[in-house]
Image (spheres, grey):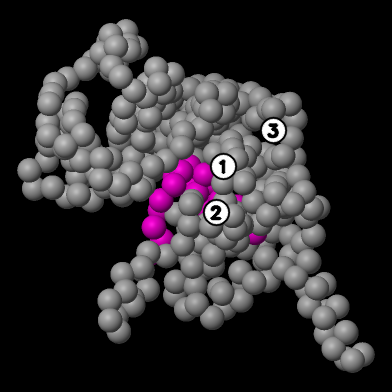
């Protein structure tokens, strides 16, 4: 840590253990002051603890602090002083963020635990398929839910001692994931009634709706629903200078798991399984004119539209109408024809 006085001079440098007792000993006796810290694993509870002691806590967005992570003399001591000086000069330079509540964090822990299991299960399934191929066999294409049964039949006899436990683990993981899915459905009913309306959108399920509500938490923080797409990193980066304004990839800011879920929803909307809607028609138009990268661009664009639509329905309380734009356009055309 680095402590500056009102004149900006360094009056103290040191270290504090990231423990509640150590933080209380160090900061409870201090007069109220501005405390700046970067986002991290401990930043939520540390900021709450220090705020409870009367300090003004500013949690800086680590992704925005190029002055720190691009420093050619980067170390903890230099980083701490840089944070202190930025907070002293203008807190907005830190791009401060707001942490979600402890209750929302606890519910999201269930969502994250499920995500970890899904990722681990996929790796185990790929391992089994690869091992069977190396012996000239092949596990038949099947649904993930049925993999442990189909793989058990396809594993060669010589590989059974190596893969039997792995296939059993996949079966246990599948059962645990089912239990998490039931919990998520119950959480939507009991703790996130707003998510029930969002589930009515074609392509959005309980998992995505719950994660969206808990991540955003306060929809009024956005004055315009379009800003949600930028908040979740679904808008293109920009590096404009003079006449140069190249097309770049999306920023990937914000919560990566929620962005991943929205992209998966975008894939479903544009797939053959997706239900017809204005959003699907719009996405397919991008696919048709987009060339080799048309499908990727369309999926991201649909994901961004979904985020905007979900926030809009949440704020207004309106019911989802999959053909709202078409119906509005038809009505306007009819009015013009009558006029």
Q: Mark 2 to mark 3: distance in Å?
A: 19 Å
Q: Which mark is residue 228?
A: 2
- Kind of element beneath mark 3: loop
Q: Position of residue 7 (x, y in %)?
A: 16, 37
The reply to whether residue 143 is in sight is: no
Query: Which secondary structure class fits the magenta region best?
Result: helix
Q: Is residue 253 magenta?
A: yes
Q: Nearer the viewer, residue 332 or 288?
A: 332
Q: Mark 2 to mark 1: distance in Å?
A: 9 Å
Residue found 12% across the figure and 31% down from its top: 10
Kindly give the residue lying farthest to the left in the view shown.
73
147 to the left or right of 164: right
- Kind of element beneath mark 2: helix
**Disc 2 to disc 1: CB gap under 8 Å:** yes
Q: Nearer the viewer, residue 307 or 88?
A: 88
Residue found 37% across the figure and 24% down from its top: 55
Q: Position of residue 242 (x, y in %)?
A: 28, 81
Q: Which mark is residue 192?
A: 3
| Magenta part of the chain | 249-269
Q: Nearer the viewer, residue 236 or 36?
A: 36
* Residue denoted by label 1: 216
- Kind of element beneath mark 1: helix
Quadrant where the C terminus sits is bottom right
Question: Is residue 100 placed above or below 54 in the rendered structure?
Answer: below
Q: Mark 1 to mark 3: distance in Å?
A: 12 Å
Of mark 2 and mark 1, the one earlier in the sequence is: 1
Of mark 1 and mark 3, the one earlier in the sequence is: 3
């Amino acid at each position: 840590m680095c402590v500056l006085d009102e004149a900006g001079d360094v009056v103290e440098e040191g270290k504090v253990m990231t423990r509640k007792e150590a933080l209380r000993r160090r900061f409870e006796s201090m007069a109220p002051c501005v405390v700046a810290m970067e986002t991290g694993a401990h930043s939520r509870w540390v900021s709450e603890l220090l705020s409870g002691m009367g300090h003004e806590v500013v949690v800086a967005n680590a992704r925005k602090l190029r002055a720190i992570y691009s420093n050619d003399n980067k170390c903890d001591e230099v980083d701490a002083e840089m944070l202190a000086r930025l907070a002293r000069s203008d807190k907005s330079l830190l791009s401060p963020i707001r942490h979600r509540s402890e209750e929302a964090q606890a519910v999201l822990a269930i969502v994250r635990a499920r995500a970890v299991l899904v990722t681990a299960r996929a790796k185990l399934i790929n391992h089994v398929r690869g091992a069977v191929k190396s012996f000239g066999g092949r596990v038949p294409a099947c649904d993930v839910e049925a993999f442990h049964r189909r793989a058990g039949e396809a594993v060669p006899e010589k590989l059974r001692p190596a893969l039997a436990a792995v296939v059993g683990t996949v079966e246990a993981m599948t059962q645990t994931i089912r239990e998490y899915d039931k919990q998520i459905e119950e959480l939507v009913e009991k703790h996130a009634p707003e998510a029930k309306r969002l589930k009515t959108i074609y392509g959005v399920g309980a998992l995505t709706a719950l994660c969206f509500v808990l991540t955003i938490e306060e929809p009024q923080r956005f004055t315009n629903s379009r800003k949600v797409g930028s908040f979740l990193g679904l808008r293109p980066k920009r590096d404009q200078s003079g006449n140069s304004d190249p097309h770049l990839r999306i920023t990937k800011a914000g919560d990566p798991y929620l962005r991943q879920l929205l992209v998966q929803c975008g894939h479903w909307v544009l797939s053959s399984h997706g239900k017809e809607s204005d959003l699907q028609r719009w996405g397919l138009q991008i696919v048709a004119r987009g060339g080799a990268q048309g499908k990727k661009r369309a999926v991201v664009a649909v994901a961004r539209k979904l985020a905007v639509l979900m926030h809009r329905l949440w704020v207004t309380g309106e019911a989802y109408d999959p053909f709202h734009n078409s119906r509005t356009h038809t009505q306007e055309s009819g009015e013009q024809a009558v006029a």
